[in-house]
Image: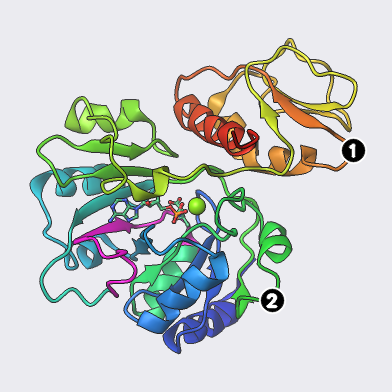
Amino acid sequence: MANSVTLVEAAAHLRVGRLVAFPTETVYGLGGDATNDRAVAEIFRVKQRPRFNPLICHLASSEAAAGLVEWTATAERLAAAFWPGPLTLVLPRRTGCQVSLLASAGLDSLALRVPDSTIARQLIAEAGVPVAAPSANRSGRLSPTRAQDIADDLNGAVAMILDGGACAIGIESTVVSLLDEVPRLLRPGGLTRDRLETVVGPLAGPANDTITSPGMAAAHYAPDRPLRLNARDAGPDEALLAFGPDAPPEGLAVCNLSPASDTAEAAANLFRMLRELDRREFTAIVVMPVPTDGLGEAINDRLRRAAKASQPAT
Ligand code: TXA
Ligand code: MG
């Protein structure tokens, strides 16, 4: 766990433009000073992320977030209900906004989030700057939910990795665009659609273009092994990612996302179990059906993307 000395040290790295990996309640982030062009460029380089895919800016408070964008009444309601927490809001950049244009990937909007993790908020407050942070994985790979996942993926590329243990939610934040009249769900995530809709009513779906939701264009979140979805059982050389009480017992080739059929538990286990089963001795990972209630919408979104990414090119 991060103590106050390591937090102060990590914040000092951020202030001089270095990168720090830090825990949030969703997944680990690869953080840099969002107002520093070189730090932001370094994030794109280390992640090998396409420059057209913008980053989320992390703040320690709603007030700090509101100061960067054209804040709205809907933003205020959502922030009051769900921040700090696993919700990212996309709003128009305010004139004179100090956040690097590179973080917005040339768009005139900005994605903002106040994370619930205490370590994350203490780090941001101590650094005294907005922190741009994508998930701390190489572009296209599974998001890290434990500090050791980052060491595996981004070895040596960051000044420091803060260890906050396993992420409680385990799946990335829900991204909602407030650029149009009706709030638009750009990415299902750690905050369920149901909870959002109790505050703002029915959400619009992602627009069918890559400008409004740039990160969703590419295939994403993929293990090395091909993935087969909605299967009942695995072949002899295949690993099984199971769900529910009717699955075979757990073992070397079987992980169960949630024996009790709880989608929140399944989200917390998803990326760790995909990593665990992504081993050379298996020809594929087959996944049992996961219901779409609660965090199931986000889980099924990530599984579909992972399956798409692992399909042979045609
Ligand atoms: O839970 C999370 O959201 C984690 C933690 C570290 O906060 N971060 C994360 O970041 O998942 P990343 O970069 O992997 O995903 C950010 C998503 C992408 O789909 C990106 O396209 C979208 O947010 N995004 C960022 N800025 C945007 C903008 N201005 N307009 C539309 N989408 C935006
Ligand atoms: Mg990511």
Residue 12 position, x and y percent, is: 49, 87
Secondary structure beneath dot 1 equals loop
Residue 63 is left or right of residue 269, and the answer is left
Q: Residue at x 52, y 72 (%)?
A: 45
- Answer yes or no: disc 2 within 8 Å of ligand 1: no
Residue 181 position, x and y percent, is: 9, 38
Residue 188 is left or right of residue 62, and the answer is right
- Answer yes or no: disc 1 within 8 Å of ligand 2: no
Counting other residues with Cα less than 10 Å from the Cα at mark 1, is it few (<14), some (14-19), or many (20 or more)? few
Towards the viewer: 103 or 71: 103
Overall secondary structure of the magenta section = loop
| Span colored in magenta | 100-119
Above-or-below relation of 292 to 1: above
Q: What residue type is labelled 2?
A: Gly
Q: Is residue 108 magenta?
A: yes
Q: Distance between the residues labelled 1 and 2?
A: 28 Å
Tell me the number on the disc at residue 281.
1
Q: Residue at x 9, y 47 (%)?
A: 73
Secondary structure beneath dot 2 equals loop
Residue 118 position, x and y percent, is: 47, 61
Tell me the number on the disc at residue 156.
2
Of the numbered discs 1 and 2, the one sitting upstream in the chain is: 2
Q: What residue type is labelled 1?
A: Glu
Rendered image quadrant of residue 176 = top left
Q: Is residue 288 magenta?
A: no
